[in-house]
Image: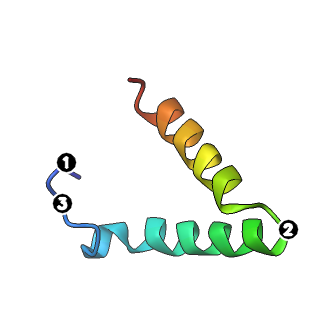
Amino acid sequence: MSPTTPTDAPENRGARILARSLLRRLKAQGFSEAQILAFATELRGLVRPA
C-alpha cells in the first residue's frame, strides 16, 4: 500500500471497519472526544514515529 492509496480503496476496507468498530466501543465506554483523539495520536506515533 502506497502513501497515495485512497482511504476508500478496497485494501483499506478492513482498517476502516476496525477503526469504526473501535470508535464505537470507545464511545460506548464513555471516552470523550479529547481522549479518543489523544489515543489516536498516540497510536499513530507508535506506527509512524515523528
- Tell me the CA gap for discs 1 and 3: 6 Å
- The dot on residue 29 is 2
Check the picture and name the quadrant holding the C terminus. top left
At numbered mark 3, what does the secondary structure look like: helix, strand or loop?
Answer: loop
**Residue name at image x 20 percent, y 66 percent:** 6
Mark 1 highlights which residue? 3
Q: Is label 1 in contact with label 3 (beta carbons under 8 Å)?
A: yes
At numbered mark 2, what does the secondary structure look like: helix, strand or loop?
Answer: loop
Q: Earlier in the sequence, mark 1 or mark 2?
A: 1
User: As drawn, which residue projects farthest toward the right?
Assistant: 29
Quadrant assignment, res 11: bottom left
For marks 1 and 2, give the one nearer the viewer: 2
In the rendered image, the vertical position of residue 2 relative to residue 27, given as above or below: above
- Tell me the CA gap for discs 2 and 3: 32 Å
Left or right, 23 with respect to 3, comes to right
Left or right, 14 with respect to 3, comes to right
* Image location of residue 15, percent across then percent down: 46, 65
In the rendered image, the vertical position of residue 21 relative to residue 33, given as above or below: below
Q: Nearer the viewer, residue 25 or 2?
A: 25
Left or right, 16 with respect to 39, comes to left
* Image location of residue 19, percent across then percent down: 55, 66
**Residue name at image x 56 percent, y 41 percent:** 43
Label 2 crowding class (10 Å Cα cut-off): few <14, some 14-19, many 20+?
few
In the rendered image, the vertical position of residue 29 relative to residue 44, given as above or below: below
Amino acid, disc 2: Gln
Mark 3 highlights which residue? 5
